[in-house]
Amino acid sequence: MKNKEIIKELSKKYDSFYLYDESVIDENAITLTGNFPDIEFLYSIKCNPNHNILKRIFSLDYGADAASSKEVEYALNYGLTKDKIYYSAPGKSITDIEETIDKSIIIADSINEIMKIQDIAQEKNISVSIGIRLNPDFSPSPSKFGIDEKAAVEFIQNTKLSNIKITGIHVHLKSQQLDNSYLSDYYGKMLGLSAKFKELLGHLDFINMGSGIGINYSANDKPLDIRALRDSVNIEFHKFKEKYPDTRLLIETGRYIACKSGIYVTKVLDKKVSRGKTYIILSNTLNGFIRPSLAALIKNGEAAEPLYTSSDAFQFLTTDERSAEEKVTLVGNLCTAADTIAEDVTLPSLEIGDVVIITNAGSYAYVLSPLQFSSQIKPVELYLTKDKEIRVL
Ligand SMILES: *Cc1c(COP(=O)(O)O)cnc(C)c1O
């Protein structure tokens, strides 16, 4: 085992801790840049915004894939320039846009958002370049991410924008691919899509092909064959660069860089036997590193109080009086499709600005939520007294 003595030494002091190994970060970072010379890589900060990791990865000439305005700020703090910071997330607020408009390249996630950015740029009397995230025709499904390709084409053909210029496209369909033929096929489609948008827009500063590069988690996973991928895509990348030398080719990656650099170390606090079954009690597991607990929970598929009760444990209400109903899917503004709270539910029809209430949130709610993820602004906890006074904790 790597770093065994260090881990033993550290665990004398700490019952549980994360340890990130810079040598692994370097190795992974260089594997990608070394094998794909026509690509500029962006590190997806949301996978791990640890200070030392960010410092290291940005010193290795990686740009930033930021999933919130806070992550744009992080990237700036490490000295990245605007053209190396790409801010992509659904549901950006006015404040998010105002804070990042002149510090990053914003990737608009919807047509509403393009117009929001346009309005803010106009107010500030500045001219900005933005990208748009697309849900391309070659993707098989509807998506909460991006603008459907057809709608984007129509928009570009029919809309005159005064203060913004669309200079790039972004697509990210599926993470954690281990099959190099899926990825090379995907990159090929992206180059085709880019040629189309280059034609349509007249110019294209960048195409951001998102992530997809996976890693072997399970002992049964066959690792992605990076060399085979390189051999099947580099000729196409190179041809594209020769034809469009002014268009930068970007790929985002989070887990490939950071995942295997880290271990979580915990300690046995107790050991007991109940009716022949032996339990090892460890320090800070669900609360220190939630993913292994989730794996056990999903596998068992049964109630796992208080993390999971049943599939219908929460109701979704709205304060609105509208009588029309609509079948909708409720999702959040994190950059992951896992951020879905209800699929195909029928609710009074909702509009931007409406309120949605989720019931049963007084216990095992705030305390069990991964509040750090994506460095989003945390929800506040308010208290209403009998005198109708609101207290902020
Ligand atoms: C989360 C995310 C990534 C990073 O994905 P990995 O699988 O960790 O490489 C890249 N791009 C976008 C748009 C993302 O939301």
Image: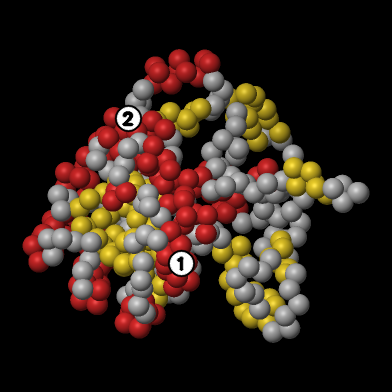
Q: In the rendered structure, which disc, 1 or 2, sits on the residue that comes first in sequence?
A: 2
Answer with the quarter of the image where residue 124 lies: bottom left
The residue most toward the front is 125
Residue 42: x, y in percent? 30, 48
- Front-most of 323 and 37? 323
Q: In this view of the protein, which residue sits in the foreground, 213 or 151?
A: 151
- Left or right, 252 with respect to 301, comes to left
**Which residue is disc 2 drawn over?**
22
Residue assigned mark 1: 119
Q: Where's residue 388, x and y in %?
A: 87, 51
Q: Amino acid at mark 2?
A: Glu
> How many labels were placed on the picture?
2
- In this view, 367 is above or below 232: above
Residue 267 percent across, percent down from the top left: 55, 25
| Residue 256 seen in this snapshot | no
Residue plotted at (61% across, 62% down): 341
